[in-house]
Amino acid sequence: MRIDLTGLRTGPAQTWGAIRLVPLLRDQPVEGLRLHRIAYAEEPRWSEVKLGSKTSYYSYIPHGFVADWNRDGGDSGQSAAFGTQILDQRGGVRGMPMQVHRRMTQKMGKQRVRFLPLHFALEGYLALHFGGPDIAWREWSDRVLRHGLSPREEAAYRGTTVTGLQDALKVFEIHAGQCGVLLYTADALAAAFVVPHPEDYRELHPTLVLDHFGELIYQYALMMPAVQEFRASIADQGIDSLAELRAAAEAQFAQWAEFHDRVVANALLDRDYTAERGYRMGAFDLVRFRPAFKPGEENHIGEAITDGDGAIAYLKTFRLSEAQIRRGYLLELLAAHDWRLSAAATVIGTTAANLRTRIEAAGFGMMLRQKEKTAAE
């Protein structure tokens, strides 16, 4: 899968400290699909999604989306869903109320579905080779052979903790036709967010502070200096009318947009992803995707709603930290070689002992048998 942003164009960026927001504009909204926010209560909640008889997915739930398809859009106030939560009778987790969802996506009528933004993508990353080794090699601990990678967890930061993000969203202009945004911290791409219709974006723009962000994004926003703002530079010669001045200004914005589209955003767009469809919405598909997990490079996971041609109607991405990339890389490497340490180590030009060290450093030490080493190592 490739991320296809056909129909979207880059608008003039705005900066606030280390935060840069690049608007994505549509000349024509996507027909037949609308997104709205679910109004949950303001207090913090957790979600539980049953993935099987013995497996559950837990996460903090900040907000939810409802997708309507094959409709004329209508009044977003009439389409928003309220009060759909099912309270867990067992009480809260760590003193917090529990929000229980039976599925990552839930049908709410013939042409409506509720889903939790980014949770579908994050659940896919956490479930990566969750069952553990397929063959009971002696290298692996009894625990991982019996229970797989349970529990598997990753940390993320809520948008309200990302320095400057909340202020930036308050003061930045929402452009006519804006249907999305590329969010940067210290000019590192943090996230992409795309919706089908400008009215959807105006409603959902504030929810960016409720999303999850990785450790790198949090640190960059906290510690890095303010980014340089793009300023148009127009020569004072050859401008003899307002029309010529406007044309010169538009040429400057077009030049910046070309640079952004060609250089800055390529780390997200110029990649092949492994995609998995999660829900069919008439002519649209809700899919999640993951990268090839290349350490030392930018890696994003995400979810999208695509039309029949693969063009993006909805998109939300999460940039993985270097530690998260390494964990994904190691799991893919081991699974590709039947979880045999010696075989996986040979492919990457190292020893089984060195690979064990990498696995432990990545936080997967519980997978390994600690008391003995096999002859194959």
Image: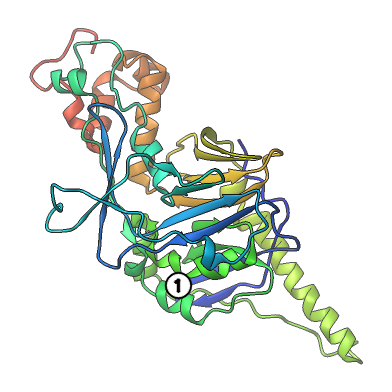
Position above or below: 374 against 193? above
Q: Quadrant of residue 250?
A: bottom right
Q: Is residue 357 placed above or below 271 in the rendered structure?
A: above
- Three-letter amino acid code of the residue under disc 1: Ala
The location of residue 34, given as percent across then percent down, is 60, 56
Q: From the viewer's perspective, is 150 left or right of 350?
A: left
Which quadrant would the N terminus be assigned to in this image?
A: top right
Judged left or right of residue 79, residue 284 is right
Q: Quadrant of residue 173?
A: bottom right
Q: Which residue is mark 1?
A: 18
Q: Is residue 40 above or below residue 49?
A: below
Q: Can residue 189 be seen in this snapshot?
A: no
Task: Count numbered badges in the picture.
Answer: 1
Q: Position of residue 260 (x, y in %)?
A: 65, 61
- Residue 12, quarter of picture: bottom right
Secondary structure of the residue carrying tag 1 is loop
The location of residue 41, given as percent across then percent down, is: 30, 65
Name the spot of residue 227 as percent of width and height, x first: 50, 73
Relative depth, front residue between 123 and 297: 123
Q: Is residue 113 visible?
A: yes
Q: Residue at the spot x=24%, y=25% of the render?
A: 356
Crowd tier of the residue under label 1, counting other residues whose Cα lies within 10 Å: few below 14, some 14–19, many 20 or above:
many
Residue positioned 38% across, 57% down in the render: 213
Determine the residue positioned at 28% across, 10% down.
135
Q: In this image, 32 relative to 365: left or right?
A: right
Instruction: Indicate how the structure is coloured in the image.
Output: rainbow
User: Seen from this angle, which residue lies furthest top?
Assistant: 375
The residue positioned 57% from the left and 75% from the top of the image is: 14
Which one is in front, 306 or 25? 306
State the residue lying farthest toward the left.
371
Say left or right for 176 vs 160.
Answer: right
